[in-house]
Image (cartoon, rainbow, N blue to C red):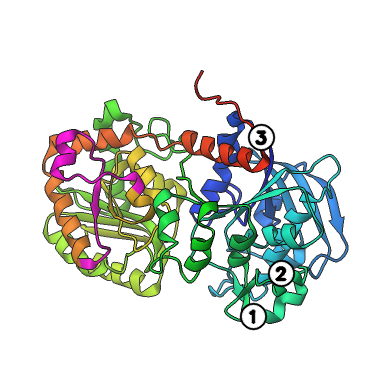
Amino acid sequence: MEVLSIASEAYPLVKTGGLADVVGALPAALAPHGVSMRVLLPGYPRVMARMGAGREVAGWADFFGGAARLIAGRADGLDVIALEAGHLYDRPGNPYVTAEGVDWADNWRRFAALSFAGYELARGVVEGYQPQLLHCHDWQAGLAPAYVRYNAPVPVKTVLTVHNIAFQGRYGWDVFNALRLDHRAAAEGAIEYFGGVGYLKAGLQCADAITTVSPTYAHEIRTVAYGMGLEGLLQARADAVHGILNGIDTVAWDPGHDPALAQGFTASTIVSRAGNKRAVEQRFGLEPGDGPIFAVVSRLTWQKGLDMLVPLCDDLVARGGRLVVLGSGDAEIENGLRGAAMRHPGRVGVVVGYDEGLSHLIQGGADVMVIPSRFEPCGLTQLYGLRYGCVPLVSRVGGLADTVIDANEAAIEAGVATGIVFAPATEEAFGEGIRRTIALFHRPKVWHKMQRRGMKSDVSWELSAEKYADLYASLLGLKRDDDTDD
C-alpha cells in the first residue's frame, strides 16, 4: 500500500509537540505491515537543510502567492517530499507563530498550500508516484480530503487523524476564494463553520475515515464536554471514527541504551536508576531527600492542568516531595512555578524551555511523571514514563485513561497497577493523587513492582501499526495477510 502522510511537522526534522513524534514514527512502524509511507512536509528552513541530495520532482510558478517546488529525498531516516515555497515557509523559529508568539497572519494560506500539494500528488503530478491513500494529520492537513472530494476526481482514499480537536484552523470567510477549492464545498456546507471556514471541520466532513489517537478520546470528542463544537458532526459520522492508540519509538526511547542518561538500566537492573536520580538532583539544584521527585515535562497550559499544580506545590514539599519542571507556556503558570522554586530552594527546580536530552534524563531519574490534564487525546509523556520506570500520576481522561492502570488496592493485589489515576481533573482530586502517590512511594515493594511492571508494558507501535494497516486495507478494498501470527 502506497500512503502519503501529510503533516506540519515530523520528528526528528521539526517538532513542537507529540504530533511530530507520531508522524515521524509511523513510516517505520508500518513498513512490516506492507505499507510504504512518504511524508509531505512544509519546506521550513530546518527541513530543507536536512534534505541533502533531494531532487526536484514538480514545480509551479504561482502556488498560493509565489513559486514553489516539491523536493523528494531521504532526511533523518524518513522518505520526505518537502514543499519548498519561500514565501510561505522560509521563516525562522516556530512553524506556527512569530517570535512574539502570535500566529502568522497567513497560516490559512500556508496550510491550504500544504493540503493542496498533497492533492496534487494524489493526482499524479510526480511521474511514477501516485499514492493510494492520503493520511492527513490535524487541521493543517484538513483541507486535503475536501480537495479530493470537491475538486477534479482523484482515485485516492483519505484518513484524517485528530491529534487535538481544540486546534481547528478557523478563519474568516473572506479567504475562501483563495483556497482553490470548488464552490460546491461551500454550497454543501463542507467547509463553512460558524460563518467562517473550518479546516478541521472540512477534513472531518470529507475524509473516508477519521482516527483519534486513543479509544477513549474517540468517544470523548463525540460529547459536548470534549467535542469543542464538532461533537454533532462526529456523532453523525460515528461509524467512520476509530480510536487507535499512539505508541512510541522504543529505539529512541530505550533506557538500556539512552546516551542522554547518566546510567542505563532495564527492568531487571532498575536499581541503576539511582545514578540518574542523582544527575537530576544536580541538574536542578535539588537537595538529596528520602521523598519522591515529581516531574513535569510539558507545555505549561490550562489544557495540561498545570495551573492546578501551582497552589499544590507547598503541600507537595511539606509532605517530603520534590519537584522538577521542564516546559514553557502560559506566563502565569511559568511565574507561579518560578515562585515555588524561590520559596523552596533545593526542593523545587524549574527550567523554562525544552531540551530533548534533559527530558530523557528526567524520565530516567525522577520518580513520578505528573500529567494532570483536563483533556488529553493520547499523551506520550506517560508512555515514556512507563518505559523508563517513572511512575505516571495522571487524570482519568483520553489516552491517559487507556494507558495507565490505577494503583488502588485491588489492582496492587492483582499485580496490574502501573500508576496513579485521579478523577475528576480538579485541584482537590489532584491534591489527593499527590498524597496517595507519596504514600505509595513509601511502600518500596509495591513501588518497585509498579515501576518494573510499567517498564514491561507494551508501549510500542506494533499493535497500533497493525490497526492502521488494517484500516488502510479496508478503505482500499484489499485483503491483508496477517503477518503477526507466524
The vertical placement of 198 against 123, above or below, is: below
Q: Is residue 466 magenta?
A: no
Q: Which residues are magenta?
A: 402-427
Q: Which mark is residue 172?
A: 1
Which residue is at the far top?
486
Residue type at mark 3 is Leu
> Which percent across, then down, holds residue 141?
64, 59
- In this rendering, the label closer to the viewer, 1 or 2: 2
**Residue 251 seen in render:** no
**Which is nearer the eye, 379 or 207?**
207
Query: Reading the chain from its start, which is encountered first: label 1 or label 2?
Result: 1
In the rendered image, is residue 481 in sight? yes
Q: Please, what secondary structure does the residue beneath circle 3 have?
A: loop
Q: How far, Cα to Cα, is label 3 from label 1?
A: 41 Å
Q: Nearer the viewer, residue 97 or 288?
A: 97
Quarter of the figure with residue 151: bottom right
